[in-house]
Amino acid sequence: MSIPKIGVIGGGQLARMMAPAAINLGIDLSILCEGAEVSSSRAVANAPVGDYKDMDTVLAFARTVDVVTFDHEHVPQEILTAMEAEGIAVHPGSSALRHAQDKLVMRAAVQRLGLPNPAWAEASCVEDVLAFGDATGWPVIAKTPRGGYDGKGVRVVGRDEAGTLGEWLADSSILLEEKVDFSRELSVLVARTPSGEMRAWPVAHTIQVDGVCDEVIAPAQDIDDAVLGAAAATATTLAESLGVTGVLAVELFEVPGRAPGFIINELAMRPHNTGHWTQDGAFTSQFEQHLRAVLDWPLGSAEPLSGPTVMRNYLGGANEELHAAFPAAMAAEPEAKIHMYGKSVRPGRKIGHVNLVGAPGADVDQLRARAGRVAATVRDGAVPVVGG
């Protein structure tokens, strides 16, 4: 029997959460880890340690598998194209992935496709920043084009602060965007196979705290059907037009009164924090779907299993003995599903999440409160007092 072999570059929690899906499908999953103690190092039998920026290391790893995919978007373009030149199947490919690697490239593509962008510009000097802000209004959003995530590499800048961007500008040009007055953040995930089959999960409402995803409500509540349809169409247009294979996450700002009701914030071409709810709340999780997609297998249903799902992240806090808190968390909320990433505890670090699936018509606010108590119990090591 020929067993499919998938190699994942990057040993973070996203690669780790592909492992159960791979086991269930009988797939041989290998993960190239950045170090011996990263999240995925103990999740699969084959987890070599190597530098994803080293050409020889990555090529040697890629030659041992049928398909290469990613836990993150940071593998250099020259390594991606070298794998493709050898005939290695890389999903998503280099031409697609560059849109998730460089926010300037992404903004230009969104504009070319006629999809909803904020006002934006490339700035190479402080004078460019001043000109953009004077034209669009202050403050503005400044972003490093490459490498930023979870709020890193993003700043809100007023006119009198424009000069503080000199350090960023000394390294490269930067992306400027208008500061959008949005009502909430949304996310839509779609999976696409190399042969072009696509499936989109319902649009989700995401809640960020200090630039980090804190909570997800799926499907998003109280949103116009026309906006939902336009959001799903936007994600599928991006996936098809950019040639994305695997899971694509499209982060949106909901902007009532501004057609089509939202603008595109950022893209990720891999499983995404805003899709963790699918592990317990959808017929096919984003992790299983990603593996099926990169192998060009038929995709599974992306429909919800039941009613709304709430996903709640928990970050590192005072409690370092996370498993010691599990009995109290599980006893307090038997319907909750606790997921942990195998990371050491560090304040502010993503170390796990909780999913709670409601029955059809369930009260979302109650689900949020229940999921929040479970996450807080694991994080702090004690059951929080309701109303305290």
Image: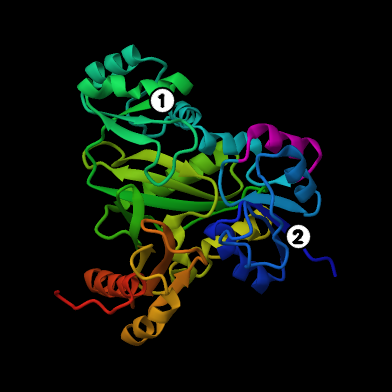
Task: From the viewer's side, name the closer residue of 48 and 195.
Answer: 48
Q: What residue appears at the point 42 percent right and 16 percent down from the top-left corner?
A: 124
Which residue type does callout 1 highlight? Trp
Tell me: 316 left or right of 243.
left
Would you say residue 305 is visible in this rendering? no
Which residue type does callout 2 highlight? Lys
Percent x, y for residue 326? 41, 80
**Residue density around tag 1, few if under 14, some if 14–19, many if 20 or more, within 10 Å:** some
Would you say residue 388 is visible in this rendering? yes
**Residue bearing mark 1:** 168
Please name the predominant secondary structure of the magenta segment in the image: helix
User: Is 224 a magenta residue?
Assistant: no
The stretch of residues the image draws in magenta is: 75-88
- Marked residue nearer the N-terminal end (1 or 2): 2
> Cα distance, mark 1 to mark 2?
41 Å
Q: What residue appears at the point 63 percent right and 44 percent down from the top-left corner?
A: 92
Identify the image quadrant of residue 133: top left
Give the mark toward the camera: 1 or 2. 1
Tell me: 145 left or right of 22.
left
**Residue density around tag 2, few if under 14, some if 14–19, many if 20 or more, within 10 Å:** some
User: Is 79 a magenta residue?
Assistant: yes
Percent x, y for residue 109? 49, 29
Percent x, y for residue 285? 52, 65
**Residue bearing mark 2:** 5
Q: What residue appears at the point 64 percent right and 33 percent down from the top-left corner?
A: 77
Q: Is residue 85 above or below residue 11?
A: above
Q: Residue furthest right?
A: 1
Q: Secondary structure at mark 2?
A: strand
Tell me the tag on residue 362: none
Quadrant for the C terminus, please.
bottom left
